[in-house]
Structures are given as C-alpha cells and as structure tokens.
Amino acid sequence: MSYRICLIEDDEILGEALAERFEVAGFSCEWYKKGASALRALRQPRCHVVVSDIQLPDTTGEALYRTLLEQGAPPPFLFITGYGAVDQAVRLLKLGAEDYLTKPFDVGELLDKVTALCERLAIVGSDGSLYLGGSPGMKAIEAALPRIAASASTVLVTGESGVGKEYVASALHQVGDPEGCKPFVAVNCGAIPESLIEAELFGYVKGAFTGAVRDKRGLFEQANGGSLFLDEIGDMPLPMQVKLLRAIQERCVTRIGAEQATRVEIRLICATHQDLAGMVSEGTFREDLYYRINVVNLHIPPLRQRPEDILWLTRLILDELAVDAGRRPCVLHSRAERALLTYPWPGNIRELRNCLERACVFSQSNVLAPEDLFGDSWQRVLVGSGGQHEESLANYIQQCERDYIRRVLVDNGERIADTAAALGISRKTLWDKMRKLGLSDYE
C-alpha cells in the first residue's frame, strides 16, 4: 500500500528536499506552497498524513487545521515550526494534532514519525481501505471483509495455528466499526478451565456460588454492541457447547443464578485450527453448533503459501519491536531476506515474530544477517528449500552495493547528506542508486 503524504511548505529548497525524500522512502507526496491550495486538496479524502509548516504565506498552519476540524475529522497532522512558535505547536497538540518538530530537524526523525502514523492505518486506512497483505489469498479476504461486515453476524475463521486469525477478526471488527467506539472482546476457549468457562462467558449474580461476592458481566455482555471473538472454539467442552448454541441462536444469555435473560447484540467471530467437520464425525464437536457458527467461513492460508506477505510482515514486526525497545528498527541483509522467503515457516506468523525478536536481542549489528535469524543452520535452510543457486556476477555486485549502502545508511541514522558524504558521492547520486537498488522499502 502506498501512503499519500500532503506536504505544506513554502520554502522552495526545504519543500523540494522533503518531497523528494518522501518519494524515495516509498510514499506518494503532494507538495503545496500555500494554505489555500492545500485546503482545497484536503477537502477530498485522498491523503493519509499531513506535514505542514506553521507559518505560511497566506495563512497559518493553525488556521488551516482549525478550518479542517470544523469541517470534520482531518487526517493526522504533523507540524514543522521554528523555536519561536513552540507554544503554538503545543496548543495544536491540545486540539488533536499528532506531533511537531522544531527547525532545524533531523529528516530521519520526521520520516520515523510519518511512518509510525501511517502504520496505524495498516489494517484500516483513513479512507476505509484495507491492507492485510499482498498475497492473492489475503487480497481475497481483504475484498470480502466489507461485505461480511455489512451483513454477516456469525463468522468462522479457520487456518493453521499462528496464521493470524485474531488479526483478521480484529480487521473485520474495525471495518464494521470505523469510528472505533464499539467493543471487541477476545477470548481463547482452550485457556479457560472447564469449571469456569460458563461464568466467564455468561457472568453471574452475587451469591450464585461460593466466592460470588458481586454481580459480574460475562464476555457476551461485555461485547454487547460490538464483536465477540471466540478463539480455538474446537477446544470448547461438549457440555458447554449446548449452552453456547442456545446463546448464539437466541442472542440471549442468562447469568449464573439469575432469573432473567439478557439480550445481546453482537457479531460473533469464532476461530479454530482444528478440522471441525472431522470432529463432528468423531463426536467431539456438536453438529448443530458447527452448522450454526459456519455461516461465513474465512480460511487464512499458511504463511508458506503467502511469500508476498513475508517481507511486509517482517517490516511491521521489526518496527513494533523497535518501538517496544525504544530504539531504531533493525533492517535485513539481502541474504537474510532470501532466507526468510525460502524458509517454510511451519509455525507461521508466530514463528516469524519469535525468530525476529530473538535476532534483534542477540544480533551485534542493526543489520540482521541470515545467521542472526537461523543460527549456523541458515545455509541448510536455503539448500533444503531449493533456494541456493548460482547468480550472475552483475547480480552479485548489485547485491553487494545494495547491502553496503544500506549498512552505511543505518550507521548514519538514515541521514542522506551524511550517508552521501561517507560514500563520497552526491545526494542526488545516492537517491538515484537507492531507487535503482530498491532501497525505498525500508528507508
């Protein structure tokens, strides 16, 4: 997904440099020098993030932002300001702006902030569009979610363990709740002791049993008006399946010890990695419950069948890990990218995340090599997957150049001017090389 940046900056030199830097970083950038022209453009829902100077020739960034607030919810705003206008920038933050940078600022820091704002739109974009991945299987799910959210009240999500079933369930909920005001309640059915599952799902009243010292709403009531996600429903005990079936059919629950039933309006999303049809044949899952929850089925392909998603997921995970650790994200050596793409990932996304987290902890460099990901066995990973092959000298030289430029970029905090100086080339030459070598995917 290409995110669109609206840049509002009247300084010719700074504006041109920032616009070009955004393009190099993989964004689509629209550059405006005056507030009036930017305002006309921003009235159309085509921009994901706005980067605006506060002092403009015909108005101020504050006036522009206030105008957009009066007309509705504007896209995320990030302001650029001089030291003398810091108080004004703080005032804008109180109005709802995302952040500000004071001049002179580090362009790498600006890119980090813009990237973080865009990643908040990774599941559901500001224009309502989705992005769950670039593989055909995920694109099909992506296209189906709006229709499902508009009509289906019961959905079954299937797929191998670790494949991202809760991620898709969350995306479905967000499509049906673009304002983000409805509850999304998730529970793993296999993680609740059998003796407690009824109380957890349906709640209880004070005095219903020993230890019930107050009334408690169950998960069905907590999700009222929103979505209830029952993960690993195949682990639901048979006696509880009868009570669950009644609650699903009637959309009513009765707390333990209560006399009156409570009606709930929810979207029920169930998920499992098990073969429920086979379990029905074996008598370990009720047939009537199976047909009741299998109204709409979304099957998520395993990661080994989605190579187009691997590097995209890797970048998301590395960015999340960096935020958690309070540092800059690690990047991948080209050999590490090839290793990730050729490994079969039997544990799917969960295994990928564990692999990357371990590599970030133990790697001595910010550039992750294959051995950081797979240890000394990384060459067997490539050979076992048929990924080791001879390549031309030209391709090898190009990969070496790409790896070297990436390493120097990381060493210099991704600052173009410092990186170009370290390489002994001009900034324009560096930008040209980055485009040619495909380095805009992480920079």
Image: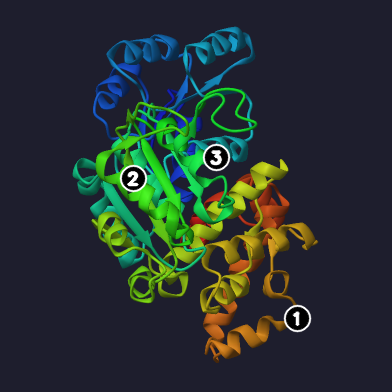
- Give the structural element (helix, strand or loop) at label 3: helix
Q: Earlier in the sequence, mark 3 or mark 1?
A: 3
Q: Earlier in the sequence, mark 1 or mark 2?
A: 2
Q: Please name the residue that numbered disc 2 is placed on.
A: 268
Do the numbered discs 3 and 1 sit on residues whose CB atoms are within 8 Å?
A: no
The amino acid at mark 3 is: Leu
- Give the structural element (helix, strand or loop) at label 1: helix
Whether residue 387 is visible here, answered yes or no, is yes
Name which quarter of the figure residue 181 lies in.
Answer: top left
Checking the image for residue 111, the label placed there is 3
- Give the structural element (helix, strand or loop) at label 2: strand
Pick whichever, 16 or 273, lies toward us. 273
Pick whichever, 252 or 89, lies toward us. 252
Residue 384, image x, y percentages = 58, 90
User: From mark 3 to mark 2, how far is it between C-alphas?
Assistant: 39 Å
In the image, residue 169 above or below residue 386: above
User: From mark 1 to mark 2, how far is it between C-alphas?
Assistant: 45 Å
Pick whichever, 24 or 139, lies toward us. 139
The amino acid at mark 2 is: Leu
| Number of dots carrying numbers | 3
The amino acid at mark 1 is: Asp
Residue 220, image x, y percentages = 41, 36
Q: Nearer the viewer, mark 1 or mark 2?
A: 2
Checking the image for residue 44, the label placed there is none
Residue 160, image x, y percentages = 46, 68
Name which quarter of the figure residue 106 lies in.
Answer: top right
Q: Please name the residue that numbered disc 1 is placed on.
A: 376
Q: Nearer the viewer, mark 3 or mark 2?
A: 2
